[in-house]
Amino acid sequence: MSLKIAVQMDPIESVNIKGDSSFALMLAAQQRGYEVYEYHVESLTLDANDRLYAQGFPVKVRMVQGDHFEKGEAVRLDLGKDIDVILMRQDPPFHMGYITATHLLERIADETLVVNDPVSVRNAPEKVMVLDYRRFMPPTLVTRSVAEVKRFMAEHGAVVVKPIHGNGGKAIFRVPADGDNLTALFEVFNQTWPEPHMVQPFLPEVAEGDKRIVLIDGEVAGAINRIPGEGEFRSNLAMGGSAEPTGLTEREQEICAAMGPDLKRLGLTFVGIDVIGGKWLTEINVTSPTGIVAISEFDGTDLAGMIWDAIELRLKGG
């Protein structure tokens, strides 16, 4: 199949090719003979005739650190007519700019396949969609109220506080059972973010790792266990965590089976879920999930290729 691919992403110049899932997808697309373009969300333009354009750059990618791409001259892409598949891969934060981009991309849904589906991405931010599966989650509070957090802590002890639209392990804080600095922390959180914040009990099991499980079209494709670095409780690889191979517990298989059909129905082709202690679901990552490079290295699988297989099947009406 000959396809033209446009990747809505952060600047390719800043990509760490050793672990970047977007780069892996671009490399796999190129190996299949697809034509690949990079564009940035800031260049999206809806013209007076309701055509959606972006300033795109044809790119060639290669696994050479520091010399990993060649970029051609800028071209004005009609994303509905000129492109077969768009990968929506810019990193959060999930703010109004991100949401507006999903509205614009939704307008070309009849012409171009957008992965993941922009309507579902808009309706399923990582720490909100997961609330549909509370039966698999630790007790979870969503609030801006210090009084509500104190009430929650009286029952659950030490907690973790995180911005509801955060990513990459940034701005996640542990508050001890005595509530030390809770009020000051919430002052900062409430001044920084207009949304409520997510509060969960601190799970000691996180020291054993935080598992990232990748689902492709609702089916389990692989997993890695992310271990926190020394002196850290956050296990995100971006925060210095390390990865190790792993399998799935019976509980994790149950979690994936419960949400898999929903993910497929919603057009969420590439999803990464996070599970702590083999049983506690904490996030469903749909905006720009990662993990396929590490999983492929450990398992000897080709998750990027599997994602393109799923995309080709969707294009064929499967």
Image: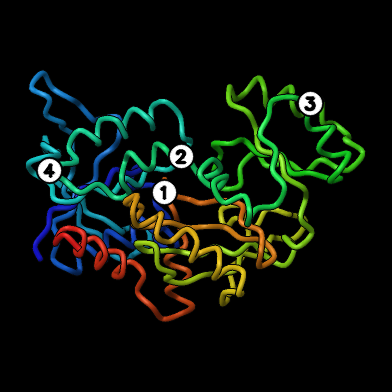
Q: Residue at x 10, y 36 (%)?
A: 78
**Mark closest to the chain's N terminus, 3 or 2:** 2
**Mark closest to the chain's N terminus, 2 or 1:** 2
Q: Viewer-nearest of labels 4 and 2?
A: 4
**Mark closest to the chain's N terminus, 3 or 4:** 4
Report, in whole angstroms, how far the alpha carbon at label 1 lies from the one at label 4. 22 Å
Kindly check if marks 2 and 1 are in contact, taking CB atoms under 8 A apart as contact. yes
Residue placed under numbered mark 1 in the picture:
288
Instruction: Identify the element where label 2 is drawn.
Output: loop
Residue density around tag 2, few if under 14, some if 14–19, many if 20 or more, within 10 Å: some
Residue placed under numbered mark 4 in the picture:
111
Labelled disc at residue 92: 2
**Mark closest to the chain's N terminus, 3 or 1:** 3
Report, in whole angstroms, how far the alpha carbon at label 3 lies from the one at label 2. 26 Å
Residue placed under numbered mark 3 in the picture:
146
Q: Residue at x 12, y 25 (%)?
A: 50
Q: Which residue sits furthest bottom?
A: 300
Report, in whole angstroms, how far the alpha carbon at label 3 lies from the one at label 1. 31 Å
